[in-house]
Amino acid sequence: MRKCLLSLVLLTGFFGSLRAQQDPQYTMFYFNKMLYNPAYAGAKDGICGTILGRFQWNGLPGAPNTWLFTADMPFNLTSDGKNQLGVGLTGYGDYIGFQQDHGLKVAAAYRRRDLGPGHLAVGIDIGFSNKNIVAPNWIYPGLPEPLPNGPTTSNFGFDFSAGVYYHNTNFYAGFSVLHLTASEFIGLNVRQARHMYFTGGYTFDIGNTNWKLNPNAIIRTDLATANFDINLNALYDINGTHGIFFGATYRYIDAIGINVGYNGSFNGGKMGMLFGYNYDINTSRLNSFNSGSHEIILRFCYKIEKNREIYERYVVRFGDSMRTRY
């Protein structure tokens, strides 16, 4: 029964790939923006590295497991720091049943700081996607098109994405389109679907307390299907440098997630660390066949600061009237 159920789940996503969303879903999307939007690269004004693991539908054989890592940093293009180039790297692996997907992308984003109340960035990423069907042994009803069967089949596709991201200390909003090339994986009867993402969030102060509220939302669509997540986190600032957060996320007709974590800074604010854990309770008809999903994220950042030493130079001919500073 479980093998038949898994085969039906795989067929829905694999054979119907022109109509179904293919990208992995993360409940803690609000800490994982660069996967969805290349314009996010360099937004933290530091060198940041993130690793994330998601273990979905535990107890169901062949259920999805996903890993992800990102790294990014900004470079100043002008001396006033208002024009920046953000660069980033994203790698991921997504495994479900016989199907294994991998990807590696390099991102570049131009950021204009202090544009209105926030900073505006536009970005692209380029890379590759690799899809593998590993020794499949399908159990499926009759279908009008053949599925790959028998030995392992693998192929690569070029990947290109673009996005826009606007943010300040308390607010962010983004729009992106991933897989613009819609690459076809020859021999697998699969074409990569274009995906659009809308993201946004805001952090509200609660009076003169150490508490803040942070709602977040994401909409995903491949123009054939769509779903959305709505999240609300409560943040408690302990002493201005360390804080804890907890909250809940609702994913449309799929799951309710409960998350908790820590976000702090060290060494005078030059270093930061974030740790988060989320547990999903499945609300779809699959809830009788699994014990929920786990998601863990860990991020480290190092703030980039340039110490400018000031030197005074006297022009002897004119005395103090031509004193200059560097």
Image (cartoon, rainbow, N blue to C red):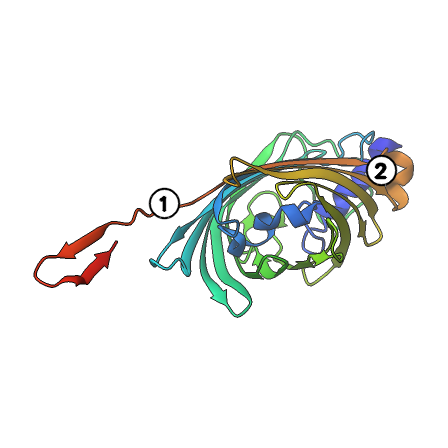
To which residue does mark 1 refer? 307
Q: Is mark 1 on a helix, strand or loop?
A: loop
Residue that carries the numbered disc 2 in the rendered image: 5
Give the label, 1 or 2, closer to the camera.
Answer: 1
Instruction: Give the answer, above or below, for where 252 lies relative to 321.
Output: above
241 left or right of 16? Answer: left
- The residue type indicated by label 2 comes to Leu
Q: How crowded is mark 1: few (under 14 residues within 10 Å), some or many (20 or more)?
A: few
- Looking at the image, residue 37 lies above or below residue 273: below
Confirm whether residue 27 shows in the render: no
The quadrant in which residue 282 appears is: top right
Front in this rendered view, residue 166 or 199: 166
- Residue type, label 1: Asn
Image location of residue 51, percent across then percent down = 59, 36
**Which quadrant would the N terminus be assigned to in this image?**
top right
Q: Where is residue 249 in the image (x, y as percent from the top left)?
A: 79, 49
Query: Considering only vertical position in the picture, is 101 above or below 159?
Result: above
In the displayed structure, does residue 311 sit left or right of residue 144?
A: left
